[in-house]
Image (cartoon, grey):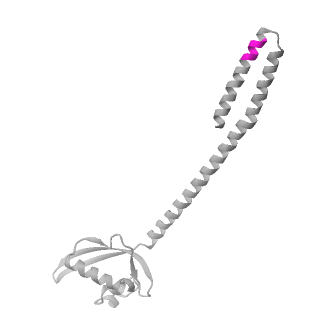
């Protein structure tokens, strides 16, 4: 009564197809007849998008579980009908958030890659040029120096500058 908007007396003795959308009524009769020939506990329309039809003609998504029962007057089938509108809305919301998350993740990766390129350029251009200028200055100082101790120190400094330049090149790449 609550789910479909009918009073009990409006449904008793009426075919269940009253609760099925017009477009699905013919197929529903065939499915119902097949189920009556071989009744068993199962979800109805497994894997299908089922809809119920309210008294006002509006439709809503449902799940139905069927259970056959042996009764004194003959076999009966109980059907448990659930409105799954809220769940479908929640599932759609989760799908939308997943798409948004994927988009944001791609944007983050793009931003990170751009930042890496910027840092690599700064390493190569600014620090690399400064170290090259230092290397040139040390070579000029070594060439002008007559003291063997100063030349050895300058050679050590040049080796260190060359090593740092190589590290900057590797980090830039």
Quarter of image, res 15 = bottom left
Let me know if residue 61 appears in the view.
yes
Q: Residue furthest right?
A: 144
Residue 2 appearing in the image: no
Rendered position, 88 above or below 109 = below
Q: Position of residue 90 (x, y in %)?
A: 48, 67
Residue 64 located within the stretch drawn in magenta:
no
How many labels sit on residues? Answer: 0
Q: Nearer the viewer, residue 155 or 111?
A: 155
- The percent position of residue 150, horizontal first and vertical second, equals 78, 12
Q: Quadrant of the C terminus?
A: top right
Residue reaching furthest to the left: 72
**Magenta part mainly helix, strand or loop?**
helix
In the image, what residue occupies the spot 73% across and 16% down?
Answer: 155
Q: Is residue 142 above or below residue 136?
A: above
Give whichever of 11, 15 is nearer the camera.
15
Q: Is residue 82 left or right of residue 103?
A: left
Question: Is residue 149 shown left or right of residue 14?
Answer: right
When the figure is inspected, residue 142 is found, relative to residue 111, above or below; the finding is above
Question: Can you say which quadrant of the picture contains the N terminus?
Answer: bottom left
User: Residue 131: horizontal and vertical position, in percent?
Assistant: 75, 29
| Point 36% across, 84% down: residue | 19
Please state the extent of the stretch shown in magenta in the rendering: 150-155
Dividing the picture into quadrants, the one containing residue 35 is bottom left
Q: Residue at x 74, y 12 (%)?
A: 152
In percent of width and height, residue 127 lies at 74, 33
Residue at the extreme front: 143
**Left or right of 109: which side holds 144?**
right
């Amino acid at each position: 009564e609550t789910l479909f908007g009918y009073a009990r007396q409006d449904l008793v003795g009426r075919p269940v197809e009253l609760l099925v959308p017009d477009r699905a009524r013919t197929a529903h009769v065939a499915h119902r007849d097949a189920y009556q020939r071989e009744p068993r506990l199962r979800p109805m329309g497994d894997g299908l998008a089922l809809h119920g039809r309210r008294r006002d003609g509006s439709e809503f998504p449902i799940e139905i579980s069927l259970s056959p029962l042996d009764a004194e007057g003959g076999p009966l089938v109980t059907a448990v009908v659930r409105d799954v509108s809220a769940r479908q809305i929640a599932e759609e919301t989760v799908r939308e958030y997943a798409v948004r998350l994927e988009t944001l993740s791609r944007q983050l990766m793009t931003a990170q890659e751009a930042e890496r390129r910027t840092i690599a350029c700064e390493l190569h251009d600014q620090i690399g040029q400064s170290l090259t200028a230092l290397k040139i200055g040390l070579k000029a100082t070594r060439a002008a120096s007559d003291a063997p101790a100063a030349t050895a120190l300058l050679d050590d400094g040049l080796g260190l500058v060359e090593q740092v330049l190589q590290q900057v090149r590797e980090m830039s790449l």
